[in-house]
């Protein structure tokens, strides 16, 4: 592989890492992390529990939010699987003696597309939920989301 090809592969790998980190931050921190502690495993119950504990969700709101949560989770799982599979293909491709540029480009495009979709899905989910909250509840959700994104790792 030429020097130019190696530089291109290196730039693409760093782009993938940056995009992956961004997708993880938006998805994981926005929906599952709040407070000062840092746990390694977060379940869907974390955000759901936080909503009920801090937002005083009414039964009517819960009924409206539940389908939004279920749809988001199904799409999130699908996209996380796509991201994992494309990442594995990138890793396998760059570890070959002769890097197949077309295969690498294809895997990177799938990876970047899925990461972008996940970021957009997460923000759409946030705004969909916000529509069903009272102004004080929405303000707390915005504050929680802001703090989760802005908090340093």
Image: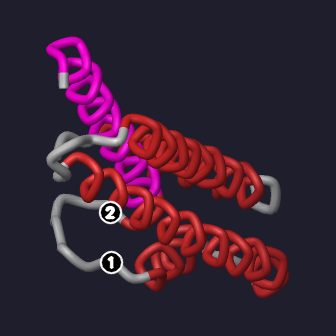
Q: Residues within 10 Å of mark 1 (few under 14, many from 20)?
A: some
N-terminal of the pair, mark 1 or mark 2, is 1
**Residue span colored magenta:** 2-30
In space, the residues marked 1 and 2 are separated at their CA atoms by 23 Å
Residue contact at pointers 1 and 2, CB within 8 angstroms: no
**Going 36% across and 59% down the picture, which residue do you hit?**
89
Instruction: Find the residue positioned furthest to the top.
Output: 4
| 113 to the left or right of 105 | right
In-front residue for pair 17/12: 12
**Going 68% across and 75% down the picture, which residue do you hit?**
69
Could you tell me if residue 61 is visible in this image?
yes
Could you tell me if residue 143 is visible in this image?
no
Question: Does the segment drawn in magenta span residue 25?
Answer: yes
In the rendered view, would you say 132 is above or below 41?
A: above
**Going 51% across and 43% down the picture, which residue do you hit?**
106
Mark 1 against mark 2, which lies toward the viewer? 2
Residue on which the image places disc 1: 42
Give the image location of residue 113, x and y in percent: 58, 43
Tell me the element at label 1: loop
In-front residue for pair 118/134: 118
Residue on which the image places disc 2: 88
Q: Quadrant of the N terminus?
A: top left
Question: Does the segment drawn in magenta span residue 152?
Answer: no
Give the image location of residue 64, x and y in percent: 84, 76
**Going 35% across and 48% down the picture, which residue do you hit?**
25
Report which quarter residue 5 is drawn in: top left
Give the image location of residue 117, x and y in percent: 62, 48
Q: Which mark is residue 102?
A: none
Give the image location of residue 60, x and y in percent: 84, 82
Tell me the element at label 2: helix
| 35 to the left or right of 104 | left
Report which quarter residue 76 is drawn in: bottom right
């Amino acid at each position: 592989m030429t020097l130019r090809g190696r530089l291109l592969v290196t730039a693409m790998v760093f782009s993938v890492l940056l995009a992956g980190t961004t997708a993880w931050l938006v998805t994981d921190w926005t929906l599952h992390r709040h407070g000062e502690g840092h746990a390694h495993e977060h379940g869907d119950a974390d955000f759901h529990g936080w909503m009920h504990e801090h937002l005083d969700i009414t039964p009517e709101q819960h009924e409206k939010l539940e389908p939004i949560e279920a749809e988001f989770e199904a799409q999130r799982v699908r996209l996380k699987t796509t991201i994992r599979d494309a990442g594995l293909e990138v890793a396998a491709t760059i570890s070959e003696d002769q890097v197949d540029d077309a295969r690498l480009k294809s895997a990177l495009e799938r990876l970047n597309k899925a990461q972008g979709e996940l970021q957009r899905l997460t923000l759409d989910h946030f705004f969909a939920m916000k529509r069903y909250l009272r102004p004080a509840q929405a303000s707390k959700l915005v504050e929680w989301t802001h703090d989760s994104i802005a908090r340093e790792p």
